[in-house]
Every structure is written in C-alpha cells, then in structure tokens.
Image (spheres, helix red, strand yellow):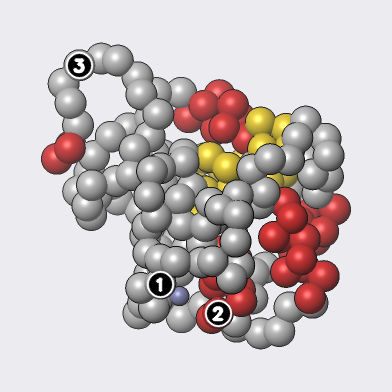
Amino acid sequence: MHFEDLSSYQYWQASPLHGVRNVGWLEPGHAFNQGQVDEAFTRKLTTLMNRRNPAKVHVNMIRGVRPCALCGADVFDQLDPSGDLLIGSSEIWIPSGDKKGWFAAPSMLLHYVVAHAYLPPAEFIAAAMTFRVDEALDAQAEYDRLVGVPLRPRHCARQDATPEPLQEPCGTPTNLSYSA
Ligand SMILES: [Zn+2]
C-alpha cells in the first residue's frame, strides 16, 4: 500500500482522517526520500516500537508478517531478536509533536530506515524523539475512537454486522479511491 508522506490517513477508510498523517508507506515504483538519519533516531524508533512499553503504539496487529514491499524480507531477527517490535505485523501510531494529531506508519518503518535508507519527514522524526515510552498511551483505542467500525474490502467482507478488529487486507482494495 502506497501513501505519500504526510498525506491524510485513509487506509481502509471511506474518507481521510485529517488529523492522522501517513509516514513510510513505501511501495516499489514510488520514489521515497532517502538519507542518513541520526543513530539516536533509529535507537528511539526501536525503543518506542517495543510492545511491552506502557505507551502502546501498535495498531491493527496481525498474526504473521507482511513482508517488506521493497525486498521481500520477512525475518527481522537482527532488528528485533525478541519479536517485541512486531515489524511487519502492525501499524504504529504516535502523537504529532504538537499532540494535536497522529502519525501512522507501517511497523516495517524500522526496516525501511535501516535497510533501505528511508528518510522519514522531519516532523515525524521530531515527534518520535520527544515521544515518552514510559507514559500510558493506547494507540489502538485512539484508532478505534477515530475510525469506529472499519470498512472492509468488499471482496473479503462478511455480511454480518459484528464489528471486528481490522484484519490483514486479503488483497488489493477494490472499494477505495485514494487521493492525497
Ligand atoms: Zn526491505
């Protein structure tokens, strides 16, 4: 799934969530910013992705791993020996620096930074660097509050009315039109 950096979040949404901005939704065939990040940022990103923190940043966790869109990697033992970072198995949502909105990124972000020299927007880096992992935060609850009952792709939607957490999309969405 490709979204432009800092565009409004619209993953499986009928309309964009304007307070939530995309970061790091990379796909082959779409250019992305590359550059050197401070090692401190990589360290902080690794720290804040740990699911055992009081601050829970993971949203829409799936079982298994969605491989890297760019290189197909699906094993991240070096980056995540304990498996606590959930690389490729979720999105991460962190508050923007002014706390008025959120950034939403695939948890593959850490691999994109380390292995593909992806350079996230400066706003995101700043928000990550000031993020407090020791303060209670529940990004999934915020997602649920903002999204309500999520849309499901038509081709894999069940017809019952029971809301469920978002599942791994079962293929290319056919019911969404995306504009940045
Ligand atoms: Zn890769």
Disc sitting over residue 73 in the figure = 1
Place of residue 83 in the rendered image (x, y in percent of width and height, measured from the top left):
56, 53
Label 2 within 8 A of ligand 1 by Cβ: yes
**Which badge, 1 or 2, comes first in the chain's sequence?**
1
**Which badge, 3 or 1, comes first in the chain's sequence?**
1
- Residue at the spot 51% in from the left edge and 62% down from the top edge: 108
In terms of depth relative to the viewer, which is nearer, 87 or 32?
87
In terms of depth relative to the viewer, which is nearer, 180 or 28?
28
- Label 3: which residue? 160
Label 1 within 8 A of ligand 1 by Cβ: yes
Q: Are marks 2 and 3 in contact (CB under 8 Å)?
A: no
Instruction: Answer with the quarter of the image where residue 168 lies.
Output: top left
Q: Is residue 24 visible?
A: no
- Label 2: which residue? 115
Instruction: Answer with the quarter of the image where residue 44 lies.
Output: bottom right
Amino acid beneath label 3: Asp
Q: Is residue 172 visible?
A: yes
In the displayed structure, 47 sits above or below 119; it is above
Amino acid beneath label 2: Ala
Amino acid beneath label 1: Ala
Mark 1 residue element: loop
Q: Are marks 1 and 2 in contact (CB under 8 Å)?
A: yes
